[in-house]
Amino acid sequence: MDNKRQKHTSKAVALTQIQRYCAFQDRCHQEVRAKLLSMGLRGPELEDIMASLITDRFLDEERFARSFARGKFNVKQWGRVRIVAELKFRNISAYCIEQALAEISPEAYAAQLAGLLQKKAAQTPDFQAHDFQARQKIAAFALRKGYESDLVWEAIEQLT
Protein backbone atom coordinates (compact mmCIF):
# COMPACT_ATOMS: atom_id res chain seq x y z
CA MET A 1 0.00 0.00 0.00
CA ASP A 2 2.86 2.34 0.75
CA ASN A 3 4.19 1.62 -2.73
CA LYS A 4 0.93 2.80 -4.35
CA ARG A 5 0.94 5.95 -2.26
CA GLN A 6 4.57 6.57 -3.24
CA LYS A 7 3.72 6.27 -6.97
CA HIS A 8 0.71 8.56 -6.58
CA THR A 9 2.86 11.17 -4.83
CA SER A 10 5.54 10.99 -7.52
CA LYS A 11 2.87 11.37 -10.20
CA ALA A 12 1.43 14.40 -8.41
CA VAL A 13 4.88 15.93 -7.98
CA ALA A 14 5.68 15.25 -11.63
CA LEU A 15 2.39 16.85 -12.69
CA THR A 16 3.15 19.99 -10.67
CA GLN A 17 6.69 20.21 -12.05
CA ILE A 18 5.60 19.66 -15.65
CA GLN A 19 2.79 22.23 -15.29
CA ARG A 20 5.42 24.78 -14.21
CA TYR A 21 7.60 23.69 -17.14
CA CYS A 22 4.72 24.25 -19.59
CA ALA A 23 3.61 27.53 -17.97
CA PHE A 24 7.07 29.03 -18.39
CA GLN A 25 6.78 28.91 -22.19
CA ASP A 26 4.73 27.09 -24.81
CA ARG A 27 5.98 23.54 -25.35
CA CYS A 28 5.22 20.90 -27.95
CA HIS A 29 4.03 17.42 -27.03
CA GLN A 30 7.39 15.92 -27.99
CA GLU A 31 9.32 18.16 -25.56
CA VAL A 32 6.94 17.45 -22.70
CA ARG A 33 6.96 13.69 -23.37
CA ALA A 34 10.78 13.72 -23.35
CA LYS A 35 10.81 15.66 -20.08
CA LEU A 36 8.38 13.20 -18.47
CA LEU A 37 10.48 10.26 -19.66
CA SER A 38 13.57 11.89 -18.15
CA MET A 39 11.65 12.16 -14.87
CA GLY A 40 11.17 8.38 -14.95
CA LEU A 41 7.50 8.29 -15.87
CA ARG A 42 6.32 5.60 -18.25
CA GLY A 43 3.13 3.99 -19.53
CA PRO A 44 -0.28 4.93 -18.16
CA GLU A 45 1.11 7.49 -15.69
CA LEU A 46 2.80 9.38 -18.50
CA GLU A 47 -0.31 9.27 -20.68
CA ASP A 48 -2.51 10.42 -17.77
CA ILE A 49 -0.28 13.42 -17.18
CA MET A 50 -0.21 14.25 -20.91
CA ALA A 51 -4.02 14.06 -21.04
CA SER A 52 -4.29 16.25 -17.96
CA LEU A 53 -1.96 18.86 -19.46
CA ILE A 54 -3.98 18.97 -22.68
CA THR A 55 -7.29 19.16 -20.82
CA ASP A 56 -6.03 21.99 -18.58
CA ARG A 57 -4.62 23.80 -21.66
CA PHE A 58 -1.02 23.65 -20.48
CA LEU A 59 -0.30 21.89 -23.77
CA ASP A 60 -1.69 23.15 -27.06
CA GLU A 61 0.09 22.25 -30.30
CA GLU A 62 -1.55 25.00 -32.34
CA ARG A 63 -0.69 27.67 -29.76
CA PHE A 64 2.87 26.33 -29.63
CA ALA A 65 3.22 26.39 -33.43
CA ARG A 66 1.86 29.94 -33.67
CA SER A 67 4.14 31.33 -30.97
CA PHE A 68 7.13 29.39 -32.34
CA ALA A 69 6.61 30.83 -35.83
CA ARG A 70 6.11 34.38 -34.53
CA GLY A 71 9.16 34.17 -32.31
CA LYS A 72 11.53 32.68 -34.85
CA PHE A 73 10.36 35.12 -37.52
CA ASN A 74 10.52 38.25 -35.35
CA VAL A 75 13.56 37.47 -33.21
CA LYS A 76 15.80 35.20 -35.28
CA GLN A 77 14.48 36.43 -38.64
CA TRP A 78 13.92 32.92 -39.97
CA GLY A 79 12.10 32.28 -43.23
CA ARG A 80 9.11 30.01 -43.78
CA VAL A 81 11.20 27.07 -45.03
CA ARG A 82 13.23 26.87 -41.83
CA ILE A 83 10.21 27.42 -39.58
CA VAL A 84 8.31 24.62 -41.34
CA ALA A 85 11.32 22.29 -41.10
CA GLU A 86 11.69 22.93 -37.37
CA LEU A 87 7.98 22.40 -36.73
CA LYS A 88 8.01 19.14 -38.71
CA PHE A 89 11.06 18.05 -36.70
CA ARG A 90 8.91 18.52 -33.58
CA ASN A 91 6.12 16.36 -35.09
CA ILE A 92 3.65 19.23 -35.39
CA SER A 93 0.63 18.48 -37.59
CA ALA A 94 0.21 20.00 -41.05
CA TYR A 95 -2.87 21.90 -39.87
CA CYS A 96 -0.95 23.53 -37.00
CA ILE A 97 1.95 24.39 -39.32
CA GLU A 98 -0.50 26.06 -41.70
CA GLN A 99 -1.99 28.06 -38.82
CA ALA A 100 1.50 29.04 -37.67
CA LEU A 101 2.48 30.36 -41.09
CA ALA A 102 -0.70 32.45 -41.13
CA GLU A 103 0.85 34.44 -38.27
CA ILE A 104 3.40 35.91 -40.70
CA SER A 105 1.99 38.56 -43.01
CA PRO A 106 3.31 38.56 -46.59
CA GLU A 107 4.17 42.27 -46.32
CA ALA A 108 6.20 41.82 -43.14
CA TYR A 109 7.89 38.78 -44.66
CA ALA A 110 8.97 40.66 -47.80
CA ALA A 111 10.09 43.69 -45.78
CA GLN A 112 12.14 41.54 -43.41
CA LEU A 113 13.82 39.69 -46.28
CA ALA A 114 14.69 42.98 -48.00
CA GLY A 115 16.07 44.43 -44.77
CA LEU A 116 18.09 41.29 -44.09
CA LEU A 117 19.62 41.39 -47.58
CA GLN A 118 20.41 45.10 -47.34
CA LYS A 119 22.13 44.61 -44.02
CA LYS A 120 24.16 41.68 -45.36
CA ALA A 121 25.09 43.63 -48.50
CA ALA A 122 26.34 46.51 -46.35
CA GLN A 123 28.46 44.05 -44.34
CA THR A 124 29.94 42.47 -47.47
CA PRO A 125 32.96 44.64 -48.36
CA ASP A 126 33.27 43.42 -51.96
CA PHE A 127 29.56 43.72 -52.75
CA GLN A 128 28.79 45.25 -56.11
CA ALA A 129 25.46 45.04 -57.87
CA HIS A 130 26.90 43.29 -60.93
CA ASP A 131 29.24 40.90 -59.06
CA PHE A 132 27.69 37.42 -59.24
CA GLN A 133 29.86 35.94 -56.46
CA ALA A 134 28.89 38.68 -54.02
CA ARG A 135 25.22 38.23 -54.90
CA GLN A 136 25.61 34.47 -54.51
CA LYS A 137 27.11 34.96 -51.02
CA ILE A 138 24.19 37.13 -49.94
CA ALA A 139 21.65 34.70 -51.44
CA ALA A 140 23.28 31.77 -49.62
CA PHE A 141 22.93 33.68 -46.35
CA ALA A 142 19.20 34.23 -46.90
CA LEU A 143 18.67 30.63 -47.98
CA ARG A 144 20.33 29.39 -44.78
CA LYS A 145 17.91 31.57 -42.85
CA GLY A 146 15.08 29.65 -44.53
CA TYR A 147 13.78 32.02 -47.18
CA GLU A 148 12.46 30.71 -50.48
CA SER A 149 14.92 30.80 -53.38
CA ASP A 150 12.65 32.66 -55.80
CA LEU A 151 11.88 35.36 -53.23
CA VAL A 152 15.56 35.72 -52.34
CA TRP A 153 16.67 36.25 -55.94
CA GLU A 154 13.77 38.61 -56.60
CA ALA A 155 14.75 40.67 -53.55
CA ILE A 156 18.41 40.69 -54.64
CA GLU A 157 17.38 42.00 -58.06
CA GLN A 158 15.43 44.80 -56.35
CA LEU A 159 18.43 45.50 -54.13
CA THR A 160 20.75 46.08 -57.09
Image (cartoon, grey):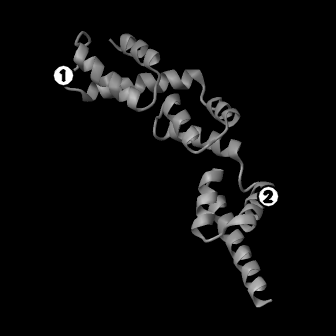
SS label for mark 2: loop
Residue bearing mark 2: 56
Residue 121: x and y in percent read 29, 24
Which of the two marks, 1 or 2, is nearer to us in this view? 2
- Pointer 1: residues within 10 angstroms few (<14), some, or many (20+)? few
Tell me which label, 1 or 2, sits earlier in the chain. Answer: 2
Residue 128: x and y in percent read 22, 15
Residue 111: x and y in percent read 49, 23
In the rendered image, the vertical position of residue 35 relative to residue 150, given as above or below: below
Q: In this view of the protein, which residue sits in the foreground, 70 or 87? A: 87
In the rendered image, the vertical position of residue 121 relative to residue 9, given as above or below: above
Looking at the rendered image, the quarter that the C terminus falls into is top left
Residue shown at 73% from the left, 59% from the top: 50
Q: Is residue 73 visible?
A: yes
Q: In this view of the protein, which residue sits in the foreground, 117 or 136? A: 136
The three-letter amino acid code for the residue at tag 1 is Asp
Residue shown at 74% from the left, 86% from the top: 3
Residue bearing mark 1: 126
Looking at the rendered image, the quarter that the N terminus falls into is bottom right
Q: CA distance from mark 1 to mark 2?
A: 56 Å
Q: Is residue 27 visible?
A: no
Residue 105: x and y in percent read 60, 25
Q: In which quarter of the view is residue 141 placed?
A: top left
As drawn, the residue found furthest toward the bottom would be 2
SS label for mark 1: loop
Residue shown at 45% from the left, 30% from the top: 146
